[in-house]
Image: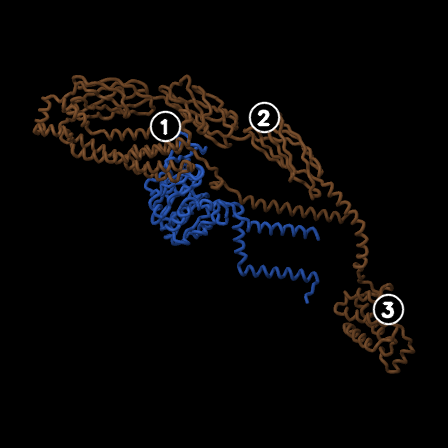
Chain colours: A blue, B brown
Amino acid sequence: MSTSKIIGIVIGVVILVSLFSIWFYPSLQDYMTENVSWNGGNRITEEFNITPLDEFTALPEVPAGTAVISLPYIAYSDNEAAEVKSYIESGGTLIIMDDFGRANKLLEYLGVSARFNGHTVMDPLFCYRSQVMPVVSDLDASLKESGINSLTLNHPSLLENTAGWKVLARSSVTSYCDENENGTWDKGEATGPFVIAAESTMGKGKIVLISDPSILINSMLDKSDNRKLVGYLAGRYGESGTVFLDRVHLEKSPLDAARKSLISTRQTVSHPYILTIIVLILFVIITGYIYKRGLIIG
Amino acid sequence: MSRYKDILKRLLLILLLTVMLCSLNGQALIAGDSGPKWHEDPESVTPVFIPYWLLAYYLDSLDFIINLDKLSSLTNLEQLQYARIPPELAEAAKGFREGGTGLTDSFIDLYKLWEKARGLVAERKFSEAYAVYRQMLAGLPQARSDVTEVKAAVIASGLYLNIDKLSGSNPLRAEYERVMEKISLIEELHEMMEKPLVDLEKIKEMVNLIEPGLLEQITALLNLPPEELEKALQNLNPEIILQLLKNTDLTLEIEPDTAFVGDEVNFRGRLTCEGQPLAGREIKIMLDRETAASATTNGSGEFRGTLRLPYSYRPTAEAQAFYFPSGNDVVRYLESSSPVVTINVLYYEANLTLHQEGAAYPGRDAVLVGEFDYGSAPVPPERQVTVYIDSTEAGEFASGGTFRTAVSVDSNILPGKHTVTALAAASGRYAPVTGTCTLDVKLAVPVLTLNMPGIGLLPGPLGFSGSLTSEVGPLSGAVVKVSSGKDQVELSTAKDGTFSGKLGLGMSPDLIGTQPVRLEIRPAEPWNAPLTVTRNVFMINWVTCGLLLVLMLALAYLIPRLMKRWHVAAHRKPEPGVVFPKPSAVPVPVEAQVEQVKAGKTEEEAATNPVVYWYHRVIQFIQEMTRRIRRPQETLREYAREVSRLLGPLSEYFYELTLLVEKRLYSGRPPEKEDVEKSRSRAEEILRWKG
């Protein structure tokens, strides 16, 4: 076997194995629907029929009765912010879940007063296992009537300047804002209760702010009444099949980006014309090879 | 040589394949794990319970009740079911919640009734006041029961937390005592509520001592027949008796209105009744609801005196003067209180910054560095500071400004972050100061120097030696367990951390290869971390290797011989392309041929042996087709087998023809007719392919 043939086989095998790895290896990125591990988001999309939104131009044309869940780890461009504003004012509901304050720029654009603080709220008494996972039970009547009595959070933040907003959830009196992130309450650090979730109207639509997106990950859905809250959000602000999860502004790992490209390529190649051309090319190559080798069939 | 180069080249390419596979796919997979962590896996979070916060929660709950904030109190108590508390405290927490919920309703309602009754008395609406008062009295037993339940829950929590064993300045104990003080305050308020609006018993006592003239005045005032008045007094009818009493007015001034803790301030005021001074009456001055001083009014109804501000470091204190009628005044005047006067309380505060210096290990002293920052306040020469790690007292020292001190760290403390609290108690004008920092406790990682051969023989002993040290010092008395598969040995290190020994390796079916040798180190000192190290040793099993070598030598002798025979038989290959000249046909004398032709016979009939005749016809064709002639040493049958691979479907016919020929040649008898016909048909089948 000649050297060139071996090199060709090597490259071919490497490409094939890489493609298989990219296709089949599970995603490990937070909130991704392909991620089935503790920090994945496959359960919310399956259980609540939430549609991933991979292109921002795919916002529903009739916003009323729909909702978009946004986890803005990547900042919104001005065009996207304008689209969102139009979406809300036309009747859509935007649910922003953030615990690092990255959504504040969007909120500033939308002209609302509330902001995400960005520092972690800890509760050493009302918590699941430790203070980094506070349990909040001071909930609005509308949540309690839906059977939601408590929520377990995971490194949440808090909302500020919520005057005029309808407060949906507050932390307990023993909670504090760990401004210097040292895991201990220090003199001067604000103590609770803090606003964790709030809602306000804007035009014909609504904005809902929740200072902890971790409620959506697989391992948190079963904690307290988190699942009921997601169902409440999906049911109240959007009918089934009309709740979208904005993945455009989620950070993606190279694996996820590669998989996305692969899916896109596969869709392109699956076009009947393209498939026909590929089959014809393969046929010509194989036939030439056989003829060259002098094999006569029959 | 070129063949070896070719093989080497191919091996290198295969290696390249392996490296590319691992690197490219590894990148894709590892890159899938990128991104910052916004949260943690809930099941991997270490459970923690910090008792201080439970007591702080109790304190907040009681504050809501005392501040009459019913909604906040009930909302706060409702949350207690979601608190993370140990199972042993669940019952106490439940009791606090239930008692607290009842107390919220009972206390707040009772207090409001009490205030309402007092207000009605001030408006001289005595009937209504006493109606409200009786309503309040009816609710007091339930309120007391609720307080008892709350108190029992707090005491039970204190027992679980071993509060009694903590020192007085321990933050946890201090918080517990604050909770108990709040409960005592509620109980005192209950007692105050229970006191009658007017001391009717005293009135009854005084009835017999009333001056005759006063009684006539009372009778005239009330316009009641004397016997009715006496009856009212005997029956303690408060509504009538209260009509006898007059309102009094009380004022209070404090000078100066700003003072340091512990300093004296002057107070003065006046007691009057309907504008007229009341002389010789005792006035009580209360500071933050505690009696701080008393004075007696002079002829003008004025009173004055001094009171000392207590060492409670709160920015303000509320002073109020009270007049409680005594003696004859019981049946003449109502009690009164002055408006509240706020005193600005001054004291020195400081910030205490604290940080850890160097590493902290369990069982060893950790160094803390701190500084008191008094700002513009004067710096005291020295203050007693107590240090706690979590809730455990770790040390005590005296310092005024900057300090650097060693605190003992418990040997059982878990590695990780702990809270260090330094508490400087109040001293005169200096308020207590608390500083906290995080103490990062870690275990020293042992460093192992190991001498172990890279190659070992098994079965047999494997010698090793080494030493263990850490950043703290050598590991003395550490247990070193060396194992490989089922074999293991255990020994201890010397004082200088050195060790040596031998690991006996038993027989195993392995031949040659690396075998992991595992060393597990368990230090004796609590500040050193355990360590596990694995070293691969190339093992040679000399027993199995020897046996294998013998077997290979035996096979090396026998197999070639077997192979040779098989190879010769099976690998005799045809030689394509060797063209031998056409063999001549079986010679038949020309005269005989002519005669035969003349006789009109066919070649077959003319042939001496028809079977052989047909064989020769066929063999020519086959030789042409296969380019294979029969060798002289080759039998007909061997030749037939040889060319059968090349004849395809004709091989069967040729083989049968060969058998017929052999039969004819070796039997010595003339061919049978059947054999002739059979040979003819086989030959014709074959020759048909000739075209």
> Tag 3's secondary structure?
loop
| Marks 2/1: CA–CA distance | 44 Å
Q: Chain of mark 2?
A: B
Considering only order in the chain, which callout, 1 or 2, is on the residue closer to the N terminus?
A: 1
Residue B415 vs residue B513: left or right? left
Report the amino acid beneath label 3: Pro
Q: What is the crowding at mark 3: few (fewer than 14 residues within 10 Å), some, or many (at least 20)?
A: few
Q: Chain of mark 3?
A: B
Q: Nearer the viewer, mark 1 or mark 3?
A: 1
Q: Which residue is mark 3?
A: B583
Q: Which residue is mark 1?
A: B177
Q: Nearer the viewer, mark 2 or mark 1?
A: 1
Name the residue located 41 percent from the left edge and 19 percent from the top edge.
B383
Q: Position of residue B88 (x, y in %)?
A: 42, 36
Q: What is the crowding at mark 1: few (fewer than 14 residues within 10 Å), some, or many (at least 20)?
A: some
Q: Position of residue A107 (x, y in %)?
A: 39, 42
> Tag 1's secondary structure?
helix
Report the amino acid beneath label 1: Glu
| Marks 2/3: CA–CA distance | 101 Å
Report the amino acid beneath label 2: Gly
Res. B473 mark: 2
Classify B435 as above or below B671: above
Res. A122 mark: none
Discs 2, 3: same chain = yes
Discs 2, 1: same chain = yes
Q: Position of residue B342 (x, y in %)?
A: 27, 25
Q: Position of residue B440 (x, y in %)?
A: 50, 30
Residue A120 visible from this viewpoint: no
Task: Find out whether the residues at labels 1 and 3 contact each other: C-beta distance under 8 Å.
Answer: no
Discs 1, 3: same chain = yes
